[in-house]
Image: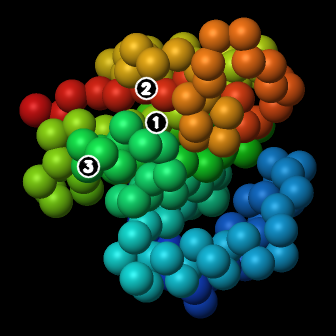
Amino acid sequence: MVSQKIGVRQIEKEDIDVLWALVDALGHVRDVDYFYRCFELQAEGKRLLFVAALDGQDAGYCILNWVPKYGLFQKIGIPEIQDLNVVPELRRQGVGAALINHCEAVAKAMGHDRMGIGVGLERSYGAAQRLYVRLGYIPDGNGATYDRKLLSFGESRPLDDNLCLMMTKNLA
């Protein structure tokens, strides 16, 4: 078995082409202003953008959001890992775990003792659901959310990227 090296780095606005190349490799669609807004928020100290490389090849990215939209995380000051994506042909090689571990280390260094993450409920998120549990994340106990807002009993929402289960992990 060949040993592979994974590196994670913070990315700056000058490297936006890296993010667009990853989005293309993922087959995702993003609003043309999406990453520019992310970099504005990074400049304001509200989030950080990270890219992971596997043996020198850019393989995935994520956002560490210091000011998440989810009310519980806001209320108790939990940062949230968001928009975690790994290029399909480079999955199951530790890239997602490396991004999560890096975000946790940054949050811990900033004095946080808990981390949050949301995961979609549709079956294409199955690998992410298993990864998060394997890394120690547990549901926050508030049930499903839609667009980071709690759902009430009997409420209906579409099964899309906005329907999530919010999870936390103690970093101490």
Q: Residue 37 location, x and y as percent?
A: 63, 77
Which residue corresponds to the image point at 72% horizontal and 37% vertical from the top-left? 162
Q: Secondary structure at mark 3?
A: loop
Which residue corresponds to the image point at 45% horizontal and 76% vertical from the top-left? 42
Is residue 77 depicted above or below 72 in this figure?
below
16 relative position to 110: left or right: right
Q: Is residue 90 visible?
A: no
Q: Nearer the viewer, mark 1 or mark 3?
A: 3
79 relative position to 60: left or right: left
Q: Earlier in the sequence, mark 1 or mark 3?
A: 3
Of residues 75 and 165, which is closer to you in this image? 75
The residue lying furthest to the bottom in this view is 14
150 relative position to 161: left or right: left
The three-letter code of the residue at mark 3 reads Gly
Q: Residue 91 location, x and y as percent?
A: 66, 33
Q: Is there a contact, CB below 8 Å, between mark 1 and mark 2?
A: yes
Q: Residue 98 location, x and y as percent?
A: 42, 41
Name the residue tied to disc 1. 117
Q: Secondary structure at mark 1?
A: strand
Whole-angstrom CA distance, mark 1 to mark 2, is 5 Å
Residue 167, numbered circle: 2
32 relative position to 9: left or right: right
Q: Is residue 29 visible?
A: yes
Q: Secondary structure at mark 2?
A: strand
Looking at the picture, the colour scheme in use is rainbow
The three-letter code of the residue at mark 2 reads Met
Q: Quadrant of the C terminus?
A: top left
Crowd around label 1: few <14 · some 14–19 · many ≥20 (10 Å)? many
Whole-angstrom CA distance, mark 2 to mark 3, is 14 Å
Crowd around label 3: few <14 · some 14–19 · many ≥20 (10 Å)? some
Name the residue tied to disc 3. 77
The three-letter code of the residue at mark 1 reads Ile
